[in-house]
Image (cartoon, rainbow, N blue to C red):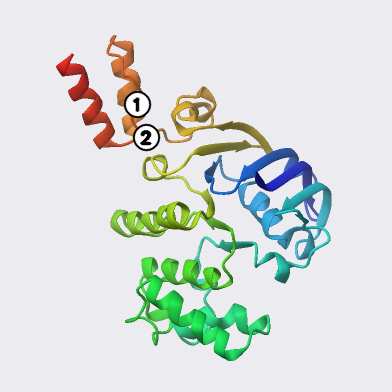
Amino acid sequence: MSIVSISNLSFQYARNTIPTLQNINLEINKGDFILLCGPTGCGKTTLCRCLTGLIPHFHSGYFEGDVLIDGLNTKNVPVYRLAKKVGMVFQNPENQLIAMNVERELGFAMENLGYPPETIWEKIEEIIEQFQLQTLRKKAPFELSGGEQQKVAIASILTLDPDIIILDEPTSNLDPLAAEKILGLLKKLNLERNKTIILIEHRLELVAPLINRLLLMDKGKLILDAPPEKALRDKKLKNLGIGIPKIIQLYELLEKEGIHFEKIPLTPFEFAEAIQSIRET
């Protein structure tokens, strides 16, 4: 069942002379883990703004088509109602954290929506326990590391328990270890709580093993929608300069040499298993 349904979506910012999005049609199912990629300026962030209702309610321009979030048309539903369905973590989480400390940040959205104080504090304690934020709860956002800021930003939108979580390049400012922890947290939310994850990310080698769909955009159009095993071998990625994971490059080299795999490996572990299986046959 589709949790997101996009029909004939086009959008042009008021200051621009050409559309940023052109005739997007897309269905997203509950529980999908999606990588949205493409060259800079292709429309990825604009598409995500449409999913949250920031377009058309906050960003002015020319909007055509329909975006349905769990059956709600974003043109007719205010952003605060959509926030209960879809939450977004922006590229720089520090700009998204505005409260004095972590525990107040976690309660900020619920407070603004008029939840009773006892409900707010109950949810804060639940989220602090779930995300293991006990040692951070009294810290101000500027005292947190980049990875901690990302973790708190994700935790803060989950206080409203949205079904869809969108993240705009969450690992861009993180070292590899912190990036893996954040991505591991997202996969856990996807598997254990059936959250639909939509991820804008350039580090394909980190996210390819986690996703079930890759969406590729170029010049405002959706030009590829496929499972990662198929998408990562599509020439469209290479033609647009998208960095192909080293594992895929090595796999393709071996295929050319006549060494065939039963399935395309997406991780070093899968690659090692495939090589071992070939050696044993």
- SS for tag 1? helix
- SS for tag 2? loop
For the N terminus, the image quarter is top right
Q: Which residue is mark 1?
A: 249
Does 122 appear above or below 47?
A: below
Residue lying at 54% horizontally and 73% vertically, measured from the top left: 159
Where residue 204 sits: x, y (%)? 42, 41
- Identify residue type, mark 2: Pro
Where residue 61 sits: x, y (%)? 82, 55
Q: Is residue 172 visible?
A: no
Residue 177, picture quadrant? bottom left
**How many residues crowd mark 2 within 10 Å: few (<14), some (14–19), many (20+)?**
some
26 relative position to 74: left or right: left
Where residue 145 sits: x, y (%)? 35, 71
- Identify residue type, mark 1: Gln
Residue lying at 45% horizontally and 75% vertically, measured from the top left: 127
**Gap between marks 2 and 1, in whole Å?**
7 Å
Q: Which residue is mark 2?
A: 245
Does 225 appear above or below 14?
A: above
Q: Residue furthest bottom?
A: 117
224 relative position to 155: left or right: right
Q: Are marks 2 and 1 in contact (CB under 8 Å)?
A: yes
For the C terminus, the image quarter is top left
Residue 130, picture quadrant? bottom left
